[in-house]
Amino acid sequence: MIIEVQTDGNIKYGYDRYEDILLKSEDGGTWHYISCNGEPVYSDYERKLLNIGRELDKEIEEMWVQREIELHEDPNYQEYLYQQWLEHEEQQRQLEMEEKNFKLGFEQKKRELIKMGFNDDEIKLIESKFLESMEFCNLEEYVVEEVEKYIQELVAKRGNVTPILPETIQDNTVFPIDALPYVVKDIVIEGQKAFDINHEFFAIPALVACATAIGSSYEVAVNRTLSTKPIIYACLISRAGTGKSPAQDIAMKPLKKLQKEAKNRYDKAIKQFEKDIEDFEKNKKFATKNGEDFEEEMPIQPRLEEYYTTNSTIEGIAKILSNNPKGIANIQDEFLAFYNGLNGYRQGKGSDMQEWLSFWNGNEVKIDRKGQGTLMINDPYVSIVGAMTPSGIREIAKDSNTENGFLDRFLFSFPTNVKPFNVSENEISEEVENTYYELIKSLLEIKPKQENNKIRLSSEAMNQYKQYCKKLDEIAGEDEKLCSIVAKLKMYSLRLGLVIHLCEKQNKSVFIKYEDIQEDSMQKAIQLCEYFRSQADKIYEKLAISENDEMVERAIKVLKKKAKQDGENYIIKKREIQQNIKGMKAEQMNHLATDLIERQILSIKEEGKQGSVTYVVNPAIMQ
């Protein structure tokens, strides 16, 4: 720190308090030491100025000391220091988040560059330019512009680059975690580690939460006449006790928190409305009594913003939608109960199933309410998320639901090798949880920039979409059932592409600057659809097995687990088989036992009193 001491014309003198020396400037800018052979040499006048500088430094120091004393005596000083610390921490957090977003943005850009045909050396050059630009100026617009400019320079030098179209995923039965939007991927990974359960348990409801937050704000358009909203019907299938509900609660937590905040706002607004309406009536009565004109407008009753419901009746859904045109999620912890409730209170004479088929398409719904008139929902948005056990698959496949397209509208996830639910020492970090909440909140708040709320596909994304549709048509062939499934997957590839695109834009990732859905988002959506196609195959394979065959398979699992060795044989009691197959009744057990004996899986060893039977298990089963 240099304290200016004296100015003589063009010459300035300054005191360097750290070095305790006098400095001199002859050009009014650059300071020079007054020295000879490296040692300070002063004239009497300069030595006097040096002492003046020391006195000034002492005065300044005493002034700062006094200021510190005054601050410490101020009762609000500690609060002031704490607020300063909080501001510093918030600034650091923002800087870290910006840096993270920059890096995430470039990771996506790298995948785009690979598809464009850039080699490893060129990508390293582009990455160096990215880091150099970010170090020079971390403004998003500057970095994007500089990197894009550099890419164009490389393209100009080497001519046209041949795009590399990504191959179809070889194993589409594994959930493609990298296909998720970055923020969603973070919450899914940390949730999986915290509860030691499959990624799908968090990913499926999280995708529905994001889609619901977007709602009817935007549609994805293939052309001027064909567009679709991001409506998702999804269901997770896993046995009881594997953590389906806790995972769904975490994924839906932002919507529920935002719903609570909306309810608090509504409660305050309704109190104010009641006061306003009371004043309105008083003023109206006073004006009428005095023969005065009354032009005051009646207060408008506030409406409750709703983002989700657990109500499964069409009337209940329709009522909510009439006040919430953006749409809602229908959250069903027990999906089978939801299914069984369709038309249930009408003794099967209602049309709830048909309405849910229409909701998926986003079509206008007309509901005739007895004694309450007709309710029209012109632009409905409802997504569904639920969970059930494998035993429910046959139940929801009844009553022609495999023919009417109800099942085909659902994205099912039926993961294998699922562990029992356990809480580990890991936990979801507060930062990841807050970032996920902010994403859902920002998606709820987005509004189209213009009246047109339709987002198109880029030419590259359209090419990907057309190729995928062609592939799906080849898979389906003339099979009527497969044709129905792939028709829904074609729509889901568009819907998921829109969800991914908008999630990344709201995440302010550096390179997600395009309005159109890009190739990378479409490719991710296709990866997800391929996974869901594999799950649909698994569902229909299960339905293709007869109930008897399925029961035999369950019995064999029990035999392998519970049969005890008796000499050279393995034996098991009839009662043990029945007790280890959930929901097995005595009559069903008798039929199953007969079937197992006819298939030479069991043979009777001995029969006891009151129907007890001990069986010998075929040794081939135990291998």
Image (cartoon, grey):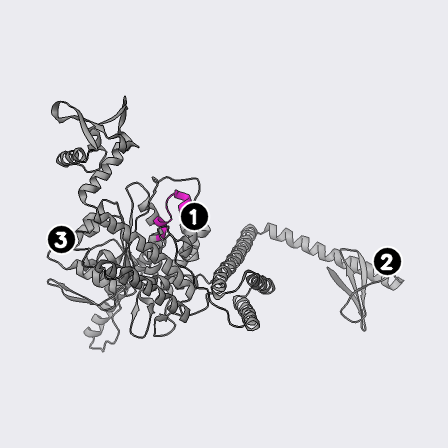
Picture coordinates of residue 260, whole percent (x, y): 33, 54
- For the point 21% across and 33% down, the residue is 601
Of the image marks 2 and 3, the number of the one nearer the N terminus: 2
- Image-quadrant location for residue 45: bottom right
Q: Amino acid at mark 1?
A: Glu
Q: Amino acid at mark 3?
A: Tyr
Is residue 194 one of those drawn in magenta?
A: yes
- Image-quadrant location for residue 178: bottom left
Which residues lie in the magenta part? 190-203
Q: Which residue is mark 2?
A: 38
Q: Secondary structure at mark 3?
A: helix
Q: Which residue is mark 1?
A: 190
Q: Main secondary structure of the magenta part?
A: helix
The C terminus is located in which quarter? top left
Comparing marks 2 and 1, which lies closer to the viewer?
1
Q: Which residue is mark 3?
A: 345
How packed mark 2 is, by other alpha carbons closer than 10 Å (few <14, some 14-19, many 20 or more), is few
User: What is the C-alpha distance between the residues marked 2 and 3?
Assistant: 100 Å
Q: Secondary structure at mark 1?
A: helix
Picture coordinates of residue 466, whole percent (x, y): 35, 67
Is residue 444 one of those drawn in magenta?
A: no
Q: Looking at the image, which is closer to me, 314 or 402?
A: 402
Q: Looking at the image, which is closer to me, 396 or 416?
A: 416
Q: Looking at the image, which is closer to me, 540 or 294?
A: 540
Q: Is residue 121 left or right of residue 494?
A: right
Q: Amino acid at mark 2?
A: Gly
Of the image marks 2 and 1, the number of the one nearer the N terminus: 2
Picture coordinates of residue 157, whole percent (x, y): 57, 72
Q: Is residue 447 left or right of residue 614?
A: right
